[in-house]
Image (cartoon, rainbow, N blue to C red):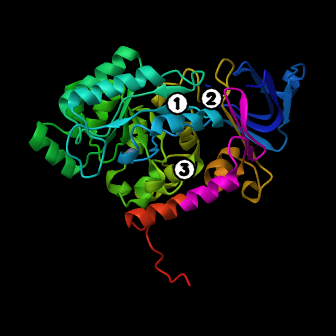
Amino acid sequence: MPNASLKIDHARYVVTLDPERRIIRDGTIFVEDGRIQRVGKAAELADARADRVIDGRLLLVTPGFVNGHMHISYAHPVRGIFPDACLQAYQDSGIRVVMGECVTDREAPWPLPRYATDEAATRTAAFIDRWDGRLDGRLTAWAMPFSYETCTAELLRALKQVVDQRGTSLTLHHNSGPRARKEAEARYGASPTAYLAALGVLGPNVVLAHALGLDDAEMDCLARTGTAVAMCPVTAAKGGRGIPEHGRMPELLGRGVKIALGCDSPNNSNHLDIVRAMNMAAIQYKDARQDMRQVPAETALEMATLTGAQAIGLGDTLGSIEPGKKADLVLFDTQRPEWQALHNPINNLVYNADGRSIHTVVVDGRVVVDAYRQSFVDEARLFEAVQEIGEQLQARTGITFPRSRWPIV
Ligand SMILES: [Zn+2]
């Protein structure tokens, strides 16, 4: 159950992301019924009484982070059993989640869940009807066709209709670049983005994942249609995707396209740390353009919070610390070496810190990580189980994880 009321008192800094982008020193946040009721200087909220008070003197508070693109698994063989098991974990952990079932109806270079066109659309509609709004509204269900290359035009159109009718959203992988444009031109007579536009599969309830290699006309099209993107800077770097040639984050930001940051999946980035994704977003364009003014730390933080929430259609209720918004908050511990010396909190957060200094997490007004401890799983047992499952998987399938280049003796 959420705490009836919660006060985070005398926070060293509250990074509000409000319209003035105030950073409140010695700030206090008062939360009740899962919502932020008041935020301001501690002295202004001295009268606020709460069921629980967190001493914030060594803590920096940000809005909850938005991870805009993430795979639970590519695993084809687990379909049918996965949603229920995941849902239990989401329930127990108290996390907020947007989820969908990956569908395709064409050949793909990877083993993806493939259905007849009608079945893919019906499954998606049923998934959304079953799950959207569950977990006290913390779960939002979307349509998730894998990509325009792996889905027919009929399926993409049908899924857009499904989400339009239900007031929810759709996401798919989307990259372009000279080769993809050439192939799409030959096949559809249009660039990948113009193809989606012609199908009617763009708009404010569509999030394109990765979005590398777009040309000017494609970016104009995204801006015109209000389409959002989720960019995965660590995946791009680790996968050698060529940010100097294909990265368009500054141009998309310049056009006002809403960008969320994503961690993609452990397959592609090795970690699920949105603070490290912010760091990469802020540094990789400086290098790619040989220009230190590119993607300031503040912009990276906006993408990971407010702009990211707007990109996924939840900007009215999430993404900033303002009265009326849902109480999703992250409390960083500034009593750690990486936070010294603390002069500009945004710089410390984006360039110095990572997710390991997250001290406490609040979702919907409920403390789900409490002074580094979370209550929903026995971590030692979980780590053991994960190691064992990985080893069994290797033994059963004969598929080995990348071997160490150095001898392990
Ligand atoms: Zn992906």
Residue topped by disc 1: 309
Element type where label 1 sits in the image: helix
- Asked if the residue under mark 2 is in contact with the one under mark 3, i.e. CB atoms within 8 Å, the reply is no
Type of amino acid at the residue the image marks with label 1: Ala
Relative to residue 344, is residue 200 drawn left or right?
A: left
Ligand 1: image quarter: top left
- State which region is magenta: 359-388
Type of amino acid at the residue the image marks with label 2: Ser
Cβ(mark 1) to ligand 1 < 8 Å?
no
Residue topped by disc 2: 320
What residue lies at 35% left-to-right and 27% top-to-bottom? 124
Quarter of the image with the N terminus in it? top right
x and y, in percent, of residue 28 in the image? 80, 29
- Asked if the residue under mark 1 is in contact with the one under mark 2, i.e. CB atoms within 8 Å, the reply is yes
Q: Is residue 231 above or below residue 36?
A: below
What residue lies at 50% left-to-right and 57% top-to-bottom? 270
Quarter of the view holding residue 384: bottom right
Magenta span contains residue 271: no
Gap between marks 3 and 2 measured at Cα: 21 Å
x and y, in percent, of residue 262 in the image? 48, 44
Most distant residue in the top direction: 165
x and y, in percent, of residue 406 in the image? 50, 82
